[in-house]
Image (cartoon, helix red, strand yellow):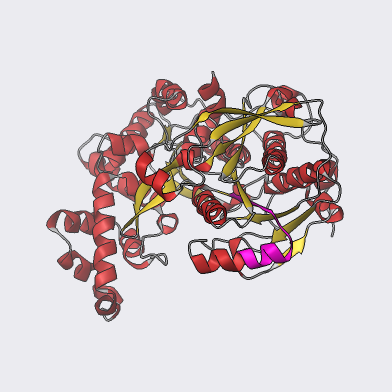
């Protein structure tokens, strides 16, 4: 396979690692833990993996001869930069325990475990993928592990291959699956450990012990580079407003981090809009007013950053979507018989008065997306809603109205962008390359310590890598009960943007100046070689949180 010059150079990079993981390690145990909420319910559902202590690894001189172990690994959910380094860290870790240890990768996610599709990951294969982006070493998938039949079917192949530990690399849903699987295998004395690793570019899988999910650093740097390029173009041509939608369905971490890096004129934070109970018109008016203010200074251009999941955080839109979901689920067959040209009026006639008025006010294209595109669970797919076009269309209409009233005398022309897949498989930044390798190596240490139901944890990552703290936290510690498909289920609690947190406060203190002035920053591409202050810097979010 032909390789680029960067791939060849990156293959030689040796990730930096916590000093505690070099040589022999021993585990130090903290106090017993409890779940973040719903303690009695979670404890009852996870009697074998609840209340375990936090673990911290420290180096020791007592090197013990250990037996070889066979480990399975699964890449689950959407891709994130650094997944290959988690696998290479895991591989090197189990080999350091005993050179005869073996690693098996299950193909295309959890489905590979259930369908018995796997490959052994040998040194020559792993070496090909070190420090590369993507999940293509074994592929990823979104199969949910949630039935006894799936657990037992997976156990068959684990026993057949003599695999005694399984590492699941994924986001909150995938690690919820890991927690349930760990409990099931422990309850049935199967002898199989299950360890999770925190992955998601969305940045919503974190707490005090999990400082950040891997991939967030790289993805935000990729998006910030492209936004910076657009802002430079914007400031050169001076005739367009660029509406830029960024990945992040459930939280606005990516939008906030990119805003801190590039200083756009406007960045919407879904959690703030929900907390202030703002309407769609409030959001549109806010943007339009900034456009008008800049136009007064002769600046008919700017940038607007929009989180992917914004529409579901606007309380009135959230209510509309919920009613639409219920209505379309119940009237699916009847709705299918209505002509496309009559569907909009049909829906308006069936909704409650408040929701009918909101639906009627939406542009035709967005109204259609809200009513037609459903995922397998019957929910609207927010990534398919062109929120950036919805907002620019509504801003244009408001400015046209203001022009007639003499409140706006500028020009308004919009360009639209959605950055998502562009950042999910980028070559990992030095931070993610180091962090992911350490997460994988830490997972091997948790396995060697005989633990199950733990998530690999590496923290203190704003310090030099040698001072990072490696260990593990019980996954049950992150769980709470939430309503999913009409039932209360145990799931890992998503971490949303904290409006009283340092990253949002830093953004809030500067956004009024960014709105009126052109204060753009141009981060440029990820730097892999050069001074450490350029190449190894963590995200602004993490730096502010750890100060």
Tell me if I can see residue 155 in this picture: yes
Q: Residue furthest front?
A: 189
Q: Residue at x 25, y 78 (%)?
A: 338
How many dots with numbers?
0
Q: Quadrant of residue 291?
A: top left
Tell me if I can see residue 235 in this picture: no
**Observer-nearest residue: 238 or 71?**
71
Give the image location of residue 481, x and y in percent.
36, 47
Quarter that holds the N terminus: bottom right
Q: Which residues are magenta?
A: 155-169
**Observer-nearest residue: 169 or 22?**
22
- Would you say 312 lies left or right of 111 here? left
Give the image location of residue 260, x and y in percent.
51, 28
Quarter that holds the C terminus: top right
Magenta region includes residue 348: no
**Observer-nearest residue: 187 or 332?**
187
Give the image location of residue 116, x and y in percent.
66, 69
Magenta region includes residue 167: yes
Reply above or below: 314 against 188: above
Q: Residue furthest bottom?
A: 337
Q: Residue at x 67, y 48 (%)?
A: 83
**Observer-nearest residue: 94 or 419?**
94
Q: Residue at x 75, y 35 (%)?
A: 528
Q: Quadrant of residue 57?
A: top right
């Amino acid at each position: 396979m032909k390789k680029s010059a960067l791939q060849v150079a990156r293959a030689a990079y040796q990730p930096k690692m916590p000093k505690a993981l070099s040589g022999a390690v021993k585990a130090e145990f903290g106090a017993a833990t409890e779940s973040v909420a719903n303690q009695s319910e979670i404890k009852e559902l996870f009697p074998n993996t609840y209340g375990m202590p936090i673990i911290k690894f420290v180096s020791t001189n007592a090197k013990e001869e250990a037996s070889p172990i066979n480990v399975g690994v699964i890449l689950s959910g959407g891709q994130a930069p650094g997944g290959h380094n988690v696998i290479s860290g895991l591989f090197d870790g189990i080999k350091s325990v005993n050179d005869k240890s073996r690693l098996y990768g299950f193909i295309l996610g959890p489905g590979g475990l259930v369908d018995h599709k796997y490959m052994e990951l040998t040194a020559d294969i792993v070496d090909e993928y070190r420090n590369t982006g993507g999940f293509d070493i074994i592929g990823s998938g979104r199969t949910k592990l949630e039935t006894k039949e799936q657990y037992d079917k997976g156990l068959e192949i684990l026993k057949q291959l003599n695999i005694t530990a399984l590492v699941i690399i994924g986001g909150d849903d995938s690690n919820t699956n890991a927690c349930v699987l760990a409990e099931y295998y422990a309850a049935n004395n199967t002898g199989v450990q299950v360890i999770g690793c925190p992955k998601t570019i969305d940045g919503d899988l974190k707490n005090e012990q999990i400082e950040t999910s891997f991939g967030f650093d790289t993805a935000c740097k990729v998006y910030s580079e492209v936004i910076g390029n657009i802002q430079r173009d914007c400031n050169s041509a001076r005739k367009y407003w660029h509406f830029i939608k960024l990945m992040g369905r459930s939280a606005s971490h990516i939008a906030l981090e990119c805003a801190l890096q590039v200083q756009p004129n406007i960045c919407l934070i879904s959690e703030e809009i929900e907390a202030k109970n703002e309407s769609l018109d409030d959001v549109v008016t806010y943007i339009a007013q900034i456009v008008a203010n800049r136009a007064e200074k002769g600046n008919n251009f700017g940038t607007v950053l929009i989180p992917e999941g914004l529409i579901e955080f606007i309380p009135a839109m959230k209510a509309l979507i919920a009613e639409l979901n219920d209505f379309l689920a119940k009237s699916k067959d009847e709705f299918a018989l209505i002509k496309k040209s009559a569907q909009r009026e049909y829906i308006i006639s069936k909704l409650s008065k408040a929701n009918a008025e909101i639906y009627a006010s939406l542009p035709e294209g967005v109204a259609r997306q809200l009513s037609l595109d459903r995922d397998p669970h019957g929910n609207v797919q927010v990534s398919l809603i062109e929120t950036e076009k919805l907002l620019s269309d509504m801003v244009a209409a408001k400015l046209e109205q203001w022009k007639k009233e003499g409140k706006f005398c500028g020009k308004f022309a919009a360009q639209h962008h959605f950055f998502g897949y562009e950042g999910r498989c980028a070559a990992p930044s030095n931070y993610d390359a180091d962090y992911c390798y350490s997460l994988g190596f830490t997972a091997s240490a948790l396995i060697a310590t005989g633990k199950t139901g733990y998530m690999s944890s590496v923290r203190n990552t704003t310090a030099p890598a040698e001072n990072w703290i490696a260990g593990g936290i019980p996954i049950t510690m992150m769980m709470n009960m939430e309503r999913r498909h009409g039932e209360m289920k145990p799931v890992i609690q998503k971490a949303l943007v904290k409006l009283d947190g340092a990253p949002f406060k830093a953004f809030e203190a500067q956004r009024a100046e960014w709105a009126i002035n052109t204060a753009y920053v141009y981060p440029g591409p990820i730097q892999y070689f050069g001074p450490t202050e350029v190449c190894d810097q963590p995200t602004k979010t993490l730096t502010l949180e750890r100060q």
